[in-house]
Image (tube, grey):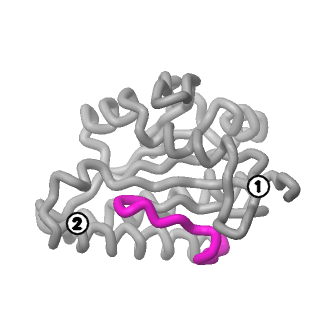
Amino acid sequence: MKPRYRTCFAVDISRFTGRDAVHQAQVRTAMHEMVKAASDAANVPWRSQKNIDRGDGVLVVTGRVGVEVLFRDFIAKLGGAVRGYNMLASPAEKIQLRLALDAGHLLKDAEGFSGIALNRACRMLDAPEFKARMTARKAEFAVITSNELHEVVRGYRLLDDTQLEKIPVDVKETHTDAWMWIP
């Protein structure tokens, strides 16, 4: 096994388990459709063998997709999809969607991928401060990225730093800072 540098993202539906089984199934289907459509529209290859279903979310290894595609096109398409969906959804089916982006060296084996970037993406999604700020602002969609990926993206001016907030991520064994924003 050789480690390969890959970008990845994780998506999670807020307050998923607080819904009944029918609404869980409906918002889960909608989330998968939105992520797939945003990936297609932004030319982010979608390969089922590189995606991990998390029940209330999905974890995707994007491979050699450039960060400019993820931070400009993909985020815009996914955020627009969430807003469009919520405009037509009943109150019980409206969603808040969290997106975590990261990159790093990953190992691939017969079961899939492993590596710090994947772990960190999942931990960033679960950061209490990220969830609290999103809820407080009643945001339909919010994004968080690692310090490491933020430095790369910032260097190429792919983000407006005035819209970003540095927040702590203290989840399980992960203790770091990350950058969040509501596009």
Front-most of residues 7 and 88: 7
Tags 2 and 1 in contact by the CB under 8 Å rule?
Answer: no
- Pick the quarter of the image with the N terminus: bottom right
Q: Secondary structure at mark 2?
A: helix
Left or right: where 90 falls relative to 17: left
- In the rendering, at what x and y percent does residue 116 appear? 67, 41
Left or right: where 7 falls relative to 85: right
Name the residue at 65% across, 61% down: 61
Q: Nearer the viewer, mark 2 or mark 1?
A: 1
Q: From what the image shows, is residue 72 above or below residue 163?
A: below
Q: Quadrant of residue 94?
A: bottom left
Classify mark 1: residues with Cα within 10 Å, few (<14), some (14-19) or many (20+): some
- Whether residue 101 is visible to the viewer of this picture, yes or no, is yes
* Residue tagged 1: 107
Q: Secondary structure at mark 1?
A: strand
First to last magenta residue range = 43-57
Q: CA distance from mark 2 to mark 1?
A: 32 Å
Assess whether residue 44 is covered by the magenta stretch.
yes
- In the rendering, at what x and y percent does residue 134 appear? 33, 37
- Whether residue 43 is visible to the viewer of this picture, yes or no, is no
- Looking at numbered disc 1 in the image, what kind of residue is underneath it? Leu
- In the rendering, at what x and y percent does residue 124 appear? 50, 38
Assess whether residue 106 is covered by the magenta stretch.
no
* Residue tagged 2: 24
Front-most of residues 82 and 119: 119
